[in-house]
Image (cartoon, rainbow, N blue to C red):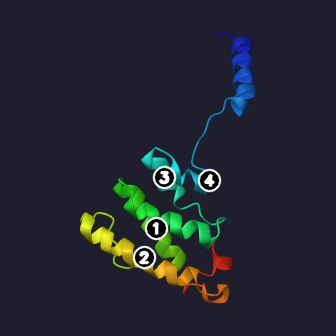
Amino acid sequence: MDRRHCWIVLIVGLSIAPIAGCRTGVRDFAELNDPAPFVRARAAGLDESVGDAQAIPALIAHLEDSDPVVRLSSHETLRQRTGQDFGFVPYGTPEDRAAAVARWRSWWATQSNAPSDRRRFPGTDRSSRP
């Protein structure tokens, strides 16, 4: 290949790259509903811009996901966001997971009915997050 041909290939490649539609990663919390488990697991951690009223119920629902990695990611995000745990084990038995999910739902029902000034969870000062 001569130099001129190399330059043409390089220029064409660089000019096409931005419009090629390549996607390098999950970018949105809404992808929590994607059919691919990897995408759902990655999306669980992207809730920073989504308010508690939307993010927490969605994350609790995904504690029942069929994929254990999605359950793990959702649980870790819930723990970081709320400071709560409720004994959920992503790889636990379906019965144990169901009991922990019921505890999460019960807790969220009391939080979502609370005045907004009481909804600050311990250890979740978002101003100090990176």
- Whether the residues at callouts 1 and 4 have beta carbons within 8 Å, the answer is no
Q: Secondary structure at mark 1?
A: helix
| Disc on res. 31 | none
Left or right: 128, with 8 as reference point:
left
Residue in the image at 54% along x and 55% along y: 43
| Distance (Cα) linking label 1 and label 2 | 7 Å
**Residue shown at 45%/48% (left/top)?**
38
State yes or no: discs 1 and 2 in contact (Cβ < 8 Å).
Answer: yes
Q: Is residue 49 above or below residue 66?
A: below
Q: Nearer the viewer, residue 109 or 68?
A: 109
Q: Residues within 10 Å of mark 1 (few under 14, many from 20)?
A: many
Asked whether the beta carbons under mark 2 and mark 4 sit within 8 Å of each other, the answer is no
What's the amino acid at mark 3? Arg
Question: Residue 123 appears in which quarter of the rendering?
Answer: bottom right
Q: Which residue is mark 3?
A: 40
Circle 3 sits in a helix, a strand or a loop, which is it? helix
Distance between the Cα atoms at labels 2 and 4?
24 Å
> Residue at point 52% right, 68% down?
57
Q: Nearer the viewer, mark 2 or mark 4?
A: 2
**Residue 96 shows in this picture:** yes
Question: Along the polypeptide, which appears first: circle 2 or circle 4?
Answer: 4
Depicted 55 relative to depicted 113: above or below: above
Disc 3 versus disc 1: nearer the observer: 1
Q: Position of residue 53 (x, y in %)?
A: 61, 71
What's the mark number on residue 104?
A: 2
Of the numbered discs 3 and 1, the one sitting upstream in the chain is 3
Counting from the top left corner in percent of width and height, residue 124 is at 58, 81
**Amino acid type, label 4:** Asp
Q: Does any portion of residue 83 appear in the rendered image?
A: no
| N-term mark: 1 or 2 | 1
Q: Amino acid at mark 2?
A: Trp
Between the C-alphas of marks 3 and 1, the distance is 13 Å
